[in-house]
């Protein structure tokens, strides 16, 4: 299986707008998406390669990704030249594509706290 065959699905509910973006409540997390939705239940699909990991929240000031989620690493799935890191974000989990080089550079290990980010343009939306 390749990471392109994996999709993270986050169930949520449209709760309004923030500026020009749609606000989706997913458990205790508020997510922002570009899709024009008025209300209702939705599922947001994220590809593992559309999510970026940070080891601290201090790096967020100058990035364009508006969605930031705190989580804990629960495991690693090894692929040919990269990995899928499983992150527990409380109400849902994410699989994030990352290279061996980045795992080493960030000193990632099981149970380490990390921050996952993605752009408002990244999710596929299903109503």
Image (cartoon, rainbow, N blue to C red):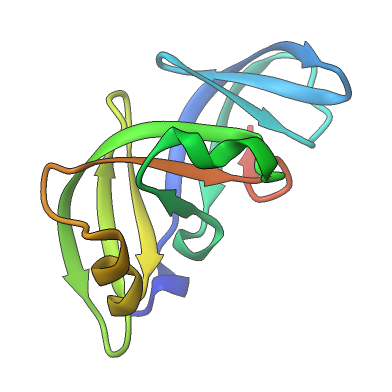
**Left or right of residue 104: residue 119:** right
In the picture as drawn, the residue positioned furthest to the bottom comes out as 80
> Which quadrant of the structure image shows residue 10?
top left
Q: Where 3 falls versus 7 (above or below)?
A: below
Q: Residue at x 28, y 72 (%)?
A: 83
Q: Residue at x 39, y 66 (%)?
A: 97
> Which quadrant of the structure image shows residue 90?
top left
Q: Looking at the image, which is closer to me, 90 or 111?
A: 111
* Percent coordinates x, y for residue 111 in the rendering: 12, 42
**In the rendered picture of this protein, how many numbered marks are placed on residues?**
0
**Left or right of residue 100: residue 120:** right
**Left or right of residue 115: residue 17:** right
* Percent coordinates x, y for residue 92 in the rendering: 32, 32
* Percent coordinates x, y for residue 91 in the rendering: 31, 24
Q: Residue at x 27, y 90 (%)?
A: 80
In the picture as drawn, the residue positioned furthest to the left comes out as 110
Which corner quadrant holds the N terminus?
Answer: bottom left
Q: Looking at the image, which is closer to me, 83 or 36?
A: 83
Q: Where 28 falls versus 123 (above or below)?
A: above
Q: Where 3 falls versus 20 (above or below)?
A: below
* Percent coordinates x, y for residue 59 in the rendering: 52, 42
Q: Residue at x 61, y 21 (%)?
A: 24
In the picture as drawn, the residue positioned furthest to the top comes out as 15
**Left or right of residue 70: residue 78:** left
> Which quadrant of the structure image shows residue 27?
top left
Which corner quadrant holds the C terminus?
Answer: top right
């Amino acid at each position: 299986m390749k990471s392109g065959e994996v999709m993270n699905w986050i169930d949520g509910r449209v709760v309004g707008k923030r500026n020009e973006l749609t606000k989706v409540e997913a458990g205790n997390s508020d997510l922002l998406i570009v899709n024009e939705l008025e209300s209702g239940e939705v599922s947001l699909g994220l590809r593992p390669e559309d999510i970026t990991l940070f080891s601290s929240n201090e790096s967020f000031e100058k990035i364009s990704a508006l969605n930031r989620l705190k989580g804990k690493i629960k495991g690693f799935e090894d692929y040919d030249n990269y990995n899928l890191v499983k992150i527990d974000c409380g109400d849902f989990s994410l699989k994030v594509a990352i290279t061996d080089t980045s795992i080493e550079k960030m000193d990632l290990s099981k149970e380490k706290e990390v921050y996952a980010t993605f752009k408002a343009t990244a999710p596929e939306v299903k109503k």
